[in-house]
């Protein structure tokens, strides 16, 4: 994967912000519509619960976002063992996605501390979502990847709105947490805005990968999207000090 972007330049960032929703995979099949409908329902729930508390929203939703990659990797691994077939790199890609999402969580936990109610919500949602997503992946991996593709479209939108809150002074642009500076190779004077920008780029990459996997499983190779690149990551998750 190309790892050339550190922080999108202002021109690119503003262009993407103004073009929102920048990328949307048009739903054509029943599976696509189910995935899109579920995504809209969950988006509405998140908007109702969090409103513009983007830091808290990020913490809670990143605990969910880190689940599908690990479920997909596990079930793909088991299928490859049973069928003695090559995984074409899917397992590592999905494990990397899960790890990347967990780093989003570890970053935002430095920015916003979840309330007691949010911690309870995280426990409940994880149990329901893990079981639900596992079941969906077993029944229709294609729908599961399409669902994640649509989730990631919403994540890109949410982080775009978070950037707007920062740019317009409604959310403080504090210094970037050390763990984020290390993970994304950001400069010492990086800010929260820089971090949200690279996280949004991560979500765009997940979006394209998952829509691509869904297209592969649906044999719609002509609809496979071009992949937005990942920002450069650290080879280790934590600073060694
Ligand atoms: Fe994320
Ligand atoms: Fe993501």
Image (cartoon, helix red, strand yellow):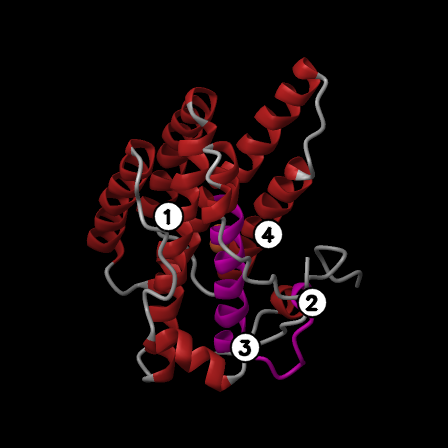
In this picture, residue 6 sits left or right of residue 129 = right
Task: Tell me the tag on residue 100.
Answer: 4
Give the secondary structure at mark 2: helix
Q: Nearer the viewer, residue 24 or 69?
A: 24
Report the quarter where the N terminus lies. bottom right
Q: Is mark 4 within 8 Å of ligand 1?
A: yes
Residue highlighted by disc 3? 8
Across and down, in percent, residue 54 comes to 35, 63
Please identify the quarter of the rendering in which residue 7 is found. Answer: bottom right
In space, the residues marked 2 and 1 are separated at their CA atoms by 29 Å
Q: Please, what secondary structure does the residue beneath circle 4 have? A: helix
Q: Residue furthest top?
A: 82
Callout 3: helix, strand or loop? loop
Q: Disc 2 marks which residue?
A: 182
**Main structural element of the magenta stretch: helix, strand or loop?**
helix
Circle 1: element type: helix
Rendered view: 173 above or below 99: below
Q: Is residue 48 above or below residue 181?
A: above
Which of 219 and 6 lies nearest the eye of the viewer? Answer: 219
Q: Earlier in the sequence, mark 3 or mark 4?
A: 3
Q: Earlier in the sequence, mark 2 or mark 1?
A: 1
Residue at figure coordinates x 39%, y 44% from the top left = 119
Say which residue label 1 marks: 150
């Amino acid at each position: 994967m190309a790892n050339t972007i550190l922080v999108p330049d202002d021109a690119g960032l503003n262009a993407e912000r103004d073009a929102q929703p920048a990328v949307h995979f048009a739903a054509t099949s029943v599976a696509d519509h189910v995935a899109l409908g579920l995504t809209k329902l969950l988006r509405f729930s998140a908007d109702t619960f969090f409103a513009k508390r983007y830091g808290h929203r990020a913490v809670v939703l990143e605990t969910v976002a880190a689940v599908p990659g690990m479920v997909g990797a596990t079930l793909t691994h088991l299928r490859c063992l049973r069928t003695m077939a090559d995984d074409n790199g899917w397992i590592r890609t999905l494990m990397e996605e899960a790890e990347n999402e967990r780093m989003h969580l570890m970053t935002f936990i430095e920015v916003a501390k979840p309330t007691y109610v949010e911690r309870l919500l995280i426990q409940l949602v994880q149990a329901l979502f893990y079981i639900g997503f596992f079941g969906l992946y077993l029944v229709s991996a294609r729908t599961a990847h399409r669902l994640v593709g649509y989730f990631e479209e919403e994540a890109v939108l949410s982080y775009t709105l978070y950037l707007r809150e920062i740019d317009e002074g409604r959310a403080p642009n504090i210094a970037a947490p050390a763990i984020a500076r290390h993970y994304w190779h950001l400069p010492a004077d990086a800010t929260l805005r820089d971090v949200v920008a690279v996280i949004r780029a991560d979500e765009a990459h997940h979006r394209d990968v998952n829509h691509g996997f869904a297209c592969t499983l649906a044999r719609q190779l002509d609809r496979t999207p071009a992949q937005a690149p990942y920002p450069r990551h650290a080879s280790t998750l934590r600073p060694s000090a």
